[in-house]
Amino acid sequence: MNPITSSVASLYGQSMQNASRAKSMANITKAANKGENIAEKNDFSYNLDISDAGRAALSNEQIKVQKNESDKAESGALSEKAQDFLAKLKEKYKDYDFFVTDNLDDENATAGATKKYSVLLKPEELEKMANDEEYADKMMGKVDEAVGITKKVEESGELGEGVSFKKISIKIDDEGNMRMFAELEKMSEAQAKRAEEAKEKKAEEKAEAEKAAKDDKGDEEQSPLTVKRATVEADNEQDFLAKILGINWDEIEAVEA
């Protein structure tokens, strides 16, 4: 076979092969349209160029998902209005520590308290107060009444000799119900005097480090300070006052202060 004849035969063979491939692809497409299952192994990989608009769309979807995740995580957080209202309460009632908690009976709820009086609010109650000024004034009026009772009995001496309030908490649940809690301490006159002297000495020790070491040695030779403690809790002012004045200190054992 001469070179020309060979070339023609080769071209003819390739054409036939391409035609055969085209026919096979047509058959496959036809079968797929009829719902026939054709399993083909795909060993190809593709490089797809994404337009700027496409990237922006994907970016927006991602931001949307992240935002939803964030909203879900913060579902129990206070609204901005409630947060602002809480800040105003703290500014107006400087003698009170305010705490927002889901568990009013949690002993650690007031762990960061720095003042004698604490007000504990359920989140739902704070939201309600933030949205109803008249209701908020009413509730804080009740808080002031409860605190006023403790101040009155302490200043009048009705608590008894050496008795004082260590901590007072007003708890308001999500239905506006209020509970009052008080922790009281009792020291003998001699113990109270020693406690006051120790307090003054501690202030001096901060300024005189060398003297502090000597004073500490002297403290070790004295018997430890002791105190009697009692707690009272009630749902209204009348019961609260009755329980405070009804404490029998003689039945309470003294512990180290």
Image (cartoon, rainbow, N blue to C red):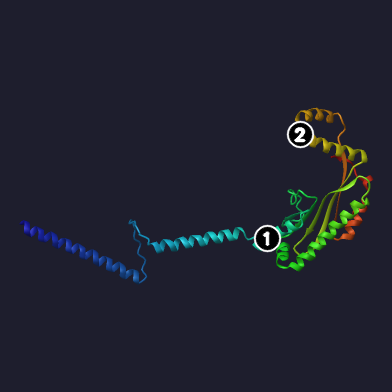
Residue 36 seen: yes
Q: Position of residue 30 (x, y in %)?
A: 31, 70
83 shown above or below 207? below
Dot 1 surroundings within 10 Å: few (below 14), some, or many (20 or more)?
Answer: few
Q: Residue at x 84, y 52 (%)?
A: 182
Q: Position of residue 81 (x, y in %)?
A: 66, 63
Q: Residue at x 76, y 65 (%)?
A: 136
Which quarter of the rendering shows the N terminus? bottom left
Q: In this image, 52 relative to 27: left or right? A: right
Residue 234 seen: no
Q: Which mark is residue 207?
A: 2
Q: Which mark is residue 11?
A: none
209 shown above or below 112? above
Which comes sooner in the sequence, label 2 or label 1? 1
Q: In this image, 215 relative to 3: left or right? A: right
Q: Answer yes or no: do the residues labelled 2 and 1 have beta carbons within 8 Å?
A: no
Label 2 vs label 1, nearer the camera: 2
Instruction: Name the image quarter holding residue 132.
Output: bottom right
Say what secondary structure mark 1 lies in.
Answer: helix
Instruction: Name the image quarter holding residue 227.
Output: top right
In whole angstroms, how far apart are the C-alphas of marks 2 and 1? 41 Å
Question: In front: 43, or 154?
Answer: 154
Say what secondary structure mark 2 lies in.
Answer: helix
Q: Position of residue 89 (x, y in %)?
A: 73, 59
Q: Residue at x 49, y 60 (%)?
A: 62
Q: In this figure, which residue is indicated by the disc labeled 1? A: 84
Q: Residue at x 86, y 28 (%)?
A: 221
Question: In front: 139, or 193?
Answer: 193
Q: In the rendered structure, which amino acid carries the disc numbered 1?
A: Asp
Q: In the rendered structure, which amino acid carries the disc numbered 2?
A: Ala
Which quarter of the rendering shows the C terminus? top right
